[in-house]
Image (spheres, grey):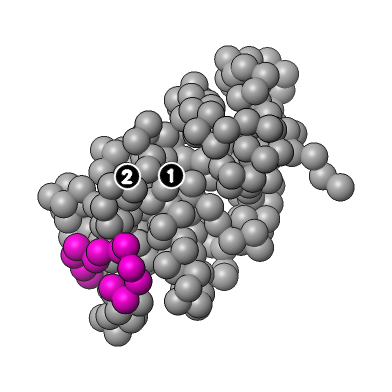
Amino acid sequence: MTDAPDADRGAAGPVRVVVAEDQAAVRSGLVLILRSAPGIEVVAEAADGEEAVRLARELRPDVVLMDVQMPRLDGVSATARITAEHLADVLVLTTFDLDEYVFGALRAGAAGFLLKDSEAADLVTAVRTVARGEGLIAPAVTRRLIAEFARPAPVRTPGGPGAEALESLTRREREVLGCLGEGLSNAEIAGRLHMAEATVKTHVSRLLAKLTLRSRVQAAVLAQELGLVQTS
């Protein structure tokens, strides 16, 4: 849902969040942190993936905070359903072990990833960032996630789908895509490319649509695969 044009949903009111976590103690802790943060409203709690999808359909929150390992319907499948129906942006809770659950959530369109042992302030910041449509991930997690996800990907030939899709982008959109591959926020991209942040948001929305991607995290991986990110 990060490709939606109304990315500043939280600007008109509190950021509405559904917390999906099967462990009651962990879920209570997450809810307590978020409810103590100004500008964030926890509208519901889910103890399994099916309940998370149902609540997303009923309540249309801004963000679903989703544990990847959930009963009844796992977090990856729940994320795929939520993003496919454009019900909310999904911020995935994970451990530092980047396993197939995490890669699956990325393919499913998760807007970001947060470590379960993150500080309370980082949780609040992550929720607000995802609600703005940024999908920003902590730099250390971004580097590891992109490296691990991109490594097994097949090499794309010049005439392959990746290169063909890239041809549909304007020069500016390619530059923005490369910046996404570095994990930059909209504000950071605006500063680097000397354009307004609103213009960056427009470019991101358009390139996601052209490349048929669900999130800027997927765009970051594609940028890595296509060699648009310069390595030092």
Q: Earlier in the sequence, mark 2 or mark 1?
A: 2
Residue count near mark 2 (Cα–Cα under 10 Å), binned few <14, some 14–19, many ≥20: some
Q: Please name the residue that numbered disc 1 is placed on.
A: 133
Q: Residue at x 80, y 39 (%)?
A: 230
Find numbered disc 2 in the image and state the secondary structure of the residue it sits on: helix
Residue 120 position in % (x across, y down): 45, 76
SS state under label 1 = loop
Q: Amino acid at mark 2?
A: Arg
Q: Residue at coordinates 42% horizontally, 47% vertically from top-left?
A: 132
Assess disc 1: are there few (<14), some (14-19) or many (≥20) residues with their C-alpha within 10 Å of its C-alpha: many
Tell me what residue is drawn at x 47 percent, y 63 percent: 125
Q: Which of the 4 quarters of the picture holds residue 51?
A: bottom left
Hey, which residue is sitting farthest right in the picture? 232
Which residue was labeled with disc 2? 9
Can residue 81 be spotted in the picture?
A: no
Note whether 48 is above or below 86 in the view shown. below
Residue 140 visible in the picture = yes
Q: Can you say which quadrant of the picture contains the N terminus?
A: top left
At label 1, which amino acid type do we have? Gly
Q: Are marks 2 and 1 in contact (CB under 8 Å)?
A: yes
**Frontmost residue, 13 versus 221:** 13
Q: Position of residue 157 (x, y in %)?
A: 71, 22
Range drawn in magenta: 35-50
Residue at position x 50%, y 77% in the image: 119
Q: CA distance from mark 2 to mark 1?
A: 9 Å
> In this figure, what is the number of numbered marks?
2
